[in-house]
Image (tube, helix red, strand yellow):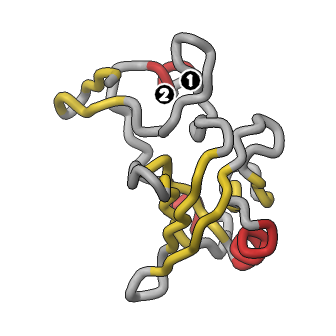
Amino acid sequence: MATSETLEEGTQLTIEYDKLGKIGERGQHVVPVVLQHAETGDVLYVAYANREALEETLRRREAVLWSTSRDELWHKGATSGDVLDLVEVRINCEQNSLLYRVVPRTGGACHTKNASGQARKSCYYRRVTSADALEHV
């Protein structure tokens, strides 16, 4: 089984194809949320929200999500300081996914750090180069 280090920093492609199955098995009622930088258009990451997370996001005007691994509300930046200020929430045509358009307060969005120890601006910091390999960009 891959460690957190090999998943987050490695160059071997190990996609978790069963993520949605695991969410379903736990009975979590969530929708995917794409978090997009409202000024640059960059996709920061994809997460999940339930009704409570959406309501908190709208109330706080900051990104709040549902942690499917911890099975709890997750206020982005509460511990890291990397708060994402909400510009708007959009919903897709079938009303089964959300788009949070946000502006990072500190510049960081990902929980991983770059070589300088700073939170990465996006969780999409590697490129797929083959069916089993990645490279940092």
Mark whose residue sits in front, 1 or 2: 2
Classify mark 1: residues with Cα within 10 Å, few (<14), some (14-19) or many (20+). Answer: few
Question: Outermost residue toward the front?
Answer: 39
Contact flag, marks 1 and 2 (Cβ < 8 Å): yes
Residue at the spot 41% in from the left edge and 88% down from the top edge: 94
Please determine whether, in this image, residue 53 is positioned above or below residue 75: below
Could you tell me residue 6's position as x and y percent? Answer: 49, 20
Residue tagged by mark 2? 7
Residue tagged by mark 1? 3
For the C terminus, give its image quadrant.
Answer: top left
Q: Nearer the viewer, residue 108 or 97?
A: 108
What SS does tag 1 mark? loop
Please determine whether, in this image, residue 127 is positioned above or below residue 109: above
Residue at the spot 60% in from the left edge and 66% down from the top edge: 87
Q: Is residue 39 left or right of residue 63?
A: left
Q: Is residue 123 left or right of residue 14?
A: right
Q: Nearer the viewer, residue 10 or 14?
A: 10
Could you tell me residue 112's position as x and y percent? Answer: 59, 28
What amino acid is found at the position of numbered circle 1 in the picture? Thr
Could you tell me residue 15's position as x and y percent? Answer: 38, 41
What SS does tag 2 mark? helix
Could you tell me residue 49's position as x and y percent? Answer: 64, 68
Residue at the spot 61% in from the left edge and 46% down from the top edge: 104
Distance of label 1 from label 2 (alpha carbons): 6 Å
Question: Outermost residue toward the top?
Answer: 116
- How many numbered marks does the figure carry? 2
What amino acid is found at the position of numbered circle 2 in the picture? Leu
Question: Outermost residue toward the left?
Answer: 130
Residue at the spot 82% in from the left edge and 45% down from the top edge: 78
Q: Nearer the viewer, residue 76 or 67?
A: 76
